[in-house]
Amino acid sequence: MNRIAVLGSTGSIGTSCLEVIASHPSAMRLVGLSANRRWKRLGQQAATFAPRFAVVCDESIRDEVDASAFGNGTELLFGEAGIERLVTADETDIVVTGIVGAAGLRGTWAALESGKRVAVANKETLVVAGPLVMELAERHGGEVIPVDSEHSAVFQAMQAGRLQDVRRIVLTSSGGPFRGATAAQLAAVTPEQALTHPTWRMGPKITVDSATMMNKALEVIEAKWLFGLDVEQIEVAVHPQSVVHSMVEFVDGAVIAQLSPPDMKLPIQYALTYPDRVSSPTTSLDFSVPFSLEFEPPDLDAFPALSLGFEVADRGGTAGAVLNAANETAVERFLDGRLEFNDIPRLCRGVLDNHNFSRSPDLAELLRQDRWARTEAEQW
């Protein structure tokens, strides 16, 4: 019985994770869940699954929360202290981090310090503090298993060989809603257009990141730390069908790809059951009907955010924390109409170029640079 805590249970990753848990009642049990402010939805989930803990992360709404909505068997907790208690509890075996943004770092950190398996759907954790997170996991006997479909695909494909035999990995991208558009055409993009993704159904922040290809930039950084690769071993290919989720090429020329319909439940379930495979609630590919798979190189002129990802992955240090914080702020400003679409990567470039770079920061320095970058981005 895998005993699972889901951080960010009301978001798209969280709800998919709960579907996976519900489909395997004899093998998985929900120990706890968390949400930032959507406490009513959190209460409904608690009533359905009867977990040991439920955490409302935003302590400022404590007085608004009706504890009776969570049932008598669920202990209601608040804030960072509540998250830490949930992820370090003896009852918790696996922590799924579905929280968007740098806010997911603290829960991941506490879980790894306790030697837990962390199913990482929060790519910002590794973007901000990748070397520290991976070292922490090794030191305390924890595990970091990727949930992002691209990194899960690489992780699965790497089971076919040894790390030292990997020539390169290729992360695939749908190209987002603006594939084929020029930089001039992108200048007039509205938030409503950016929030319409052709393949995936995700939260607003990650959907905008997909539209700018910043999402893929962050995945490049994440892949470097997650798999211990050099930047020269990481490539990106645009693949609009979103069937091939990523590929690994070994030194002998063999390319191992992971294919499946675009459904996050499969990589979530693999992270929960690894190294085992069990039946899945997802649909299967239908090879009885014709279909095609296309690949093309990304347009770095129209989508300069992707170049920032390779640059930051190469620099390391504080660059990831600053890029991530600047981007989170820029996306917020774009969504509320204070920033144009093409200004998102321009803002990130400006903040990144003007920060006080440190090559070997500790966690305190990374968090300080995160705060500085958000303030700088607001003033930009």
Image: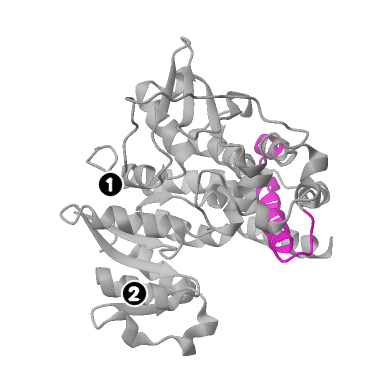
Query: Is residue 113 or residue 81 the one in the foreground?
Result: 81
Please, what is the three-letter code of the amino acid marked with disc 2?
Gln
- Residue 254, given in percent of the width and then of the height, sits at 44, 13
Tell me the quarter of the image containing the C terminus: bottom right
Give the residue drawn at x 44%, y 63%. 8
Residue for badge 2: 44
Question: What are the residue bounds of the magenta stretch?
Answer: 311-340
Q: Secondary structure at mark 1?
A: loop
Residue for badge 1: 281
Tell me the quarter of the image containing the N terminus: bottom left
Mark 1 is surrounded, within 10 Å at the Cα level, by few (under 14), some (14 to 19) or many (20 or more) other residues, namely some
Please, what is the three-letter code of the amino acid marked with disc 1?
Pro
Is residue 313 highlighted in magenta?
Answer: yes
Q: Residue furthest bottom?
A: 63
Q: Residue furthest left?
A: 26
Residue 284 vs 165, above or below: the answer is below
Query: Is residue 211 or residue 311 the one in the foreground?
Result: 211
